Image (tube, rainbow, N blue to C red):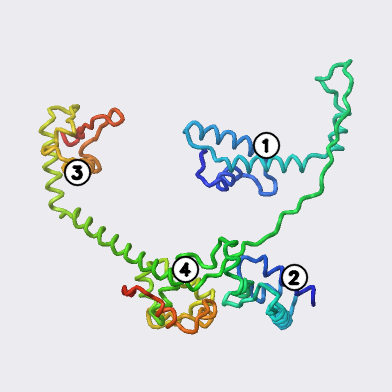
């Protein structure tokens, strides 16, 4: 039931099954209440704007259905179960409705650009071009650094798989990931980890981490052992 | 007539985008485009008076109201929204500096978003585009020169201090 931000989508999501002309604010409010409580379960921040919108919608609906005359008639007809027999009736306070408020109609003026800004924009464009060039160069360097022949990778994966199998004696045994690292340096750890992920993707091993941030273990899948 | 002119002013003031003659005819409930043209012309002449701060500007997308150049420096801080966004302005500056220029060169420098910028700049009347084989040739228009109050592109190129190659 959790919808993604922004709030307009949330409202749209919660009223998807309602006709736009007949949106039931009470149902919407109830759904929104559930939605908020689910969000709290997930410890998400509550979009205050959406709450404001819902409150405004409720207020609008209340104002639309409120008819002082009708309410007075209803009160006369229905017995108030909370009233005491000997209690004196208080004078009802009648609220005066103010004049209808019109929405202000205003445009958003846009500022004309100046010649100096055009010149500055050229410098900015040059800067952006240089940054893009640098990014492309960096990306190419990284691609080269990580470039690996398919054969090399297959060999490395096979070698790693052999090491894993040699470490374990039976099907339910597993090997500590750290035991697979020879040089103990960062680069090797990252590379081995990538290789283990490749093996797991190929369903040759299972990568296990029983505790959050705990030690990693690798267990060969049964079909490999068999 | 005066009432129609007032309505035309209100529509131009309120519209976020430039208004085409057909849209103006619809708003004013007029069947004759000729009558719309006459109204626009009269309204334009009215705004040309010195005691008016706005002017009517016609671009490819239609008519819009703008603050007259004489007053823009005094009031621009009141309008945080720019007429062109920074991406469009940068693309326009590269086109202007190299005009006439092939579209593909502009895209090389500015990236793929340049296609959208160019489309907007053509619609706004700053740039004209002519098809040339598999690409297009871009050049600035007289409206561009008027808008930035320059006589020629040389004025823009001369003012450029950096000697870095742009294309």
Q: Is residue B2 left or right of residue A158?
A: right
Location of residue B138 by image quarter? bottom left
Q: Chain of mark 2?
A: B
Location of residue B52 by image quarter? bottom right
Residue A165 lies, in percent from the top left, at 13, 34
Secondary structure under the numbered disc 2 in the rendered image: helix
Answer yes or no: do the residues labelled 3 and 4 have beta carbons within 8 Å?
Answer: no
Q: Chain of mark 1?
A: A
| Residue assigned mark 1 | A26
Q: Count all numbered tags in the image, as a single digit.
A: 4
Q: Is residue A226 visible?
A: no
Secondary structure under the numbered disc 3 in the rendered image: helix
The alpha-carbon separation of the residues under discs 4 and 2 comes to 32 Å
Secondary structure under the numbered disc 1 in the rendered image: helix
Residue A195: which numbered mark, if any? 3
Q: Local crowd at mark 1 within 10 Å, few (<14), some, or many (≥20)?
A: few
Answer yes or no: do the residues labelled 1 and 2 have beta carbons within 8 Å?
Answer: no
The alpha-carbon separation of the residues under discs 1 and 2 comes to 42 Å
Q: Is residue A80 left or right of residue A206?
A: right
Disc nearer the start of the sequence (4/2): 2
Q: Chain of mark 3?
A: A
| Residue assigned mark 2 | B7
| Residue assigned mark 4 | B88
Query: Viewer-nearest of labels 1 and 4?
Result: 4
Q: Are marks 1 and 3 on the same chain?
A: yes
State the residue in front, A161 or B136.
Answer: B136
């Amino acid at each position: 039931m959790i919808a993604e931000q922004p709030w307009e989508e949330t409202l749209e999501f919660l009223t998807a099954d309602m006709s736009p002309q007949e949106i039931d604010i009470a149902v919407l409010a109830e759904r929104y209440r559930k939605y908020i409580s689910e969000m709290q379960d997930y410890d998400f921040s509550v979009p205050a704007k959406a709450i404001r919108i819902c409150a405004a919608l409720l207020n609008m609906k209340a104002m639309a259905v409120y008819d002082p005359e009708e309410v007075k008639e209803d009160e006369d007809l229905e017995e108030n179960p909370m009233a005491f027999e000997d209690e004196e009736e208080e004078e009802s306070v009648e609220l005066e409705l103010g004049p209808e408020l019109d929405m202000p109609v205003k445009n958003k003026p846009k500022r004309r650009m100046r010649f100096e800004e055009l010149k500055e924009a050229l410098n900015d464009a040059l800067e952006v071009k240089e940054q893009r060039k640098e990014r492309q160069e960096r990306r190419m360097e990284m691609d080269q650094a990580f470039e690996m022949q398919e054969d090399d990778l297959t060999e490395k994966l096979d070698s790693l798989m052999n090491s894993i199998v040699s470490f374990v004696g039976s099907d339910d045994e597993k090997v500590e990931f750290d035991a697979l690292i020879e040089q103990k340096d960062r680069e090797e750890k990252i590379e081995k980890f990538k290789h283990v992920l490749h093996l797991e993707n190929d369903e040759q091993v299972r990568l296990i981490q029983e505790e959050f941030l705990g030690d990693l273990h690798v267990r060969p899948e049964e079909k490999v052992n068999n | 007539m005066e009432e129609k002119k007032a309505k035309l002013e209100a529509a131009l003031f309120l519209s976020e985008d430039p208004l085409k003659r057909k849209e103006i005819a619809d708003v004013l409930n007029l069947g004759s485009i000729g009558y719309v043209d006459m109204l626009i012309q009269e309204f334009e002449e009215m705004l040309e008076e010195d005691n008016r701060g706005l002017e009517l500007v016609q671009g490819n997308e239609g008519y819009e109201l703008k603050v007259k150049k004489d007053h823009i420096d005094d009031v621009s801080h009141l309008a945080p929204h720019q007429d062109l966004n920074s991406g469009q302005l940068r693309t326009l500056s590269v086109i202007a500096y190299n005009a006439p220029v092939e579209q593909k060169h502009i895209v090389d420098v500015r990236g793929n978003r340049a296609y959208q910028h160019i489309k907007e700049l053509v619609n706004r009347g700053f740039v004209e585009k002519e098809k040339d084989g598999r690409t297009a040739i871009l050049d600035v228009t007289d409206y561009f020169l008027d808008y930035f109050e320059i006589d020629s592109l040389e004025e823009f190129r001369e003012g450029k201090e950096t000697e870095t190659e742009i294309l």
